[in-house]
Amino acid sequence: MISVLLVDDEPMVCAHLRTILGAADDIEVVAEAHDGAAAVEAVIRHRPDVVLMDLRMPGVDGLAAIERINTFAERPAVVALTTFDADHYVMRALRAGASGFLVKSTPPEDLVGLVRVAADGHTVLSPDAARRLVGASAGAHAARDRAKDLISRLTEREVEVLTCLGEGMSNAGIGRRLHLSEATVKGYVSRMLDKLDCENRTQVGLLAHEAGLTGRSSSNS
């Protein structure tokens, strides 16, 4: 079972998400929280696999909660929830360690699958959405220059893997495209995290977008 914590300051939003996720045989909503402080406490108490985290909440907001959760030795996949797909809070949340983001208007039939993707350790972030986020960044030009400088440290094969990560691909999908074993891909990703000074594959994927490496349509294969 995939255990999920719902965090939103509007109880009706939590109720809506609980109804959708509760229909899946392999997902259990273990708790709800309505502010960031309660979310951190709920993570400690329930140890969920996935947290769906609203960003804009009174008191302790979602961003502060994500930063705190990201310091835990055993931390869940935190997916940011937002009303706007070009919200500057989302970029900050991803850099703070979120595993991706979903707009609250995500169709119910897609939500269950995306929660499963997050639980498997993959990025929940479509390339189109990532491009809009990068383009909306006030420091987009500076970010692109920094990204290109960092990527210059990589080998040609590592750049190929990085491009796939930017397209939201899983290790298995990358292996199929590049004719590599999953273990080999995992090794490449681990080395790139060190070389690029990133904490997770979501941050690496965003770096690929900032550098202009990606151009395909969305994939979570």
Image (cartoon, grey):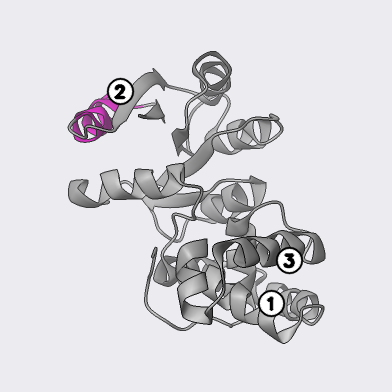
- Provide residue 102's location: percent of width, then percent of height: 38, 50
Q: Residue at x 74, y 80 (%)?
A: 145
Q: Is residue 19 magenta?
A: yes
**Are circles 3 and 1 on residues that touch, CB within 8 Å?**
yes
- Quarter in which the N terminus is drawn: top left
Real-space CA distance between mark 2 and mark 1, rounded to the nearest whole angstrom: 44 Å
3 vs 2, front mark: 3
- Provide residue 34's location: percent of width, then percent of height: 43, 22
The residue that disc 1 covers is: 158
The residue that disc 3 covers is: 192
- Marker count (numbered): 3
Between discs 3 and 2, the one toward the N terminus: 2
Real-space CA distance between mark 3 and mark 2, rounded to the nearest whole angstrom: 40 Å
Tell me: 61 left or right of 104. Answer: right
Q: Amino acid at mark 2?
A: Pro
* Residue stretch in magenta: 10-22
- Quarter in which the C terminus is drawn: bottom left
Q: Amino acid at mark 3?
A: Met
Q: Is residue 179 above or below residue 118?
A: below
Between discs 2 and 1, the one toward the N terminus: 2
Q: Residue at x 55, y 63 (%)?
A: 182
Q: Amino acid at mark 1?
A: Glu
**Could you say whether the residue bearing mark 2 is in a helix, strand or loop?**
helix
Q: Is residue 16 magenta?
A: yes
Give the overall secondary structure of the magenta segment.
Answer: helix
